[in-house]
Amino acid sequence: MAGKKYLFILILVSAAILTHGHDITTEPNSIKNWFNKLHDAKEKITELQFYVQDILSGPNPSNVQVARASSTFTSPTFFGLVAVLDDPVRTGPTPDSEIIGRAQGLFAFASLEETSLHMTFDLVFTSGDYNGSSISIVGHNPYLNQNREMSVVGGTGAFRFARGVVAVNTVSFDSSTGDAFFQYNVTVLHYTTI
Ligand SMILES: *[C@@H]1O[C@H](CO)[C@@H](O)[C@H](O)[C@H]1NC(C)=O
Ligand SMILES: *[C@@H]1O[C@H](CO)[C@@H](O)[C@H](O)[C@H]1NC(C)=O
């Protein structure tokens, strides 16, 4: 009985390492081993909810402009402006909530007719069950609309072969600084290798 219990715990621990261990992408042969187990894996849906803090003000902005066209600031839609972000990802919509990852990537004002962004970035988890895993997001973000939707196009670690949908809305926006909080509800299809 005790032996059985011990085995059960061992299986649980190795399952946790397989799916969530923070070194899964850096261990030698980790990806090859994962593929070998894929035929036994099941697809599952995971829903994640968190908040992205976008900081434009102060000495350490997390969102910086890196390029623009000569016509960007005469364009009503800022067409041609390109920026890079490394926004803190938090458990709540306030600057004191816990950081669980970073949103790292870039966006461009990509529409002549509406104020909207093309975004391409990674959600890189730095703590919790998914520490070391990431989700890649691409999408059209007409950010003046309250509700937007982007795509999950892939992932690493626990999110290998991921695909899914991201619902985004603006929780707070400070019009004097441009600082904002966005709510992200991510619904992602990925595999369990348990
Ligand atoms: C996340 O994983 C990194 C790298 O493996 C590790 O150094 C760090 O301590 C982990 N962070 C947490 C909060 O578990
Ligand atoms: C996220 O889901 C919650 C319910 O769990 C809902 O209240 C909220 O409006 C959703 N946010 C977005 C951006 O879809």
Image (cartoon, helix red, strand yellow):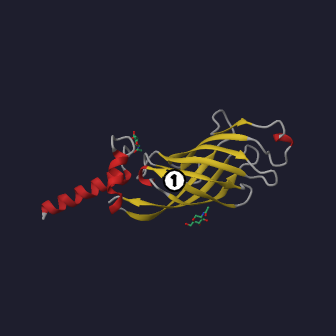
- Residue type marked 1: Gly
Quadrant hosting residue 177: top right
Quadrant hosting residue 7: bottom left
Tell me which image quadrant ligand 1 sits in: top left
Query: Which part of the image, by quadrant, shows the C terminus?
Result: bottom left
- In the displayed structure image, the side of residue 26 where residue 46 appears, left or right: right
Question: Does residue 96 show up?
Answer: no
Q: Which residue: 73% across, 35% down?
A: 67
Q: Nearer the viewer, residue 86 or 170?
A: 86
Residue lying at the far top in this picture: please name it. Answer: 59
Quadrant hosting residue 29: top left
- In the displayed structure image, the side of residue 22 where residue 98 appears, left or right: right
Question: Does residue 26 show up?
Answer: yes
Q: Is residue 14 above or below residue 2?
A: above
Q: Nearer the viewer, residue 127 or 122?
A: 122
Query: Which part of the image, by quadrant, shows the N terminus?
Result: bottom left
Q: Kindly tell me whether mark 1's CB lies below 8 Å from ligand 1.
A: no
Q: Nearer the viewer, residue 91 or 17?
A: 17
Regarding mark 1 in the picture, which secondary structure is present there? strand
The x and y percentages for residue 52 are: 59, 50
The x and y percentages for residue 117 are: 71, 50
The x and y percentages for residue 180 are: 67, 49
- In the displayed structure image, the side of residue 38 where residue 141 appears, left or right: right
Q: Nearer the viewer, residue 49 or 189?
A: 189
Q: Residues within 10 Å of mark 1 (few under 14, many from 20)?
A: many
Total marks shown come to 1
Instruction: Give the labeled residue for mark 1.
Output: 154
Q: Which residue: 73% across, 59% down?
A: 145
The x and y percentages for residue 97 are: 53, 49
- In the displayed structure image, the side of residue 13 where residue 22 appears, left or right: right
Q: Which residue: 71% across, 45% down?
A: 108
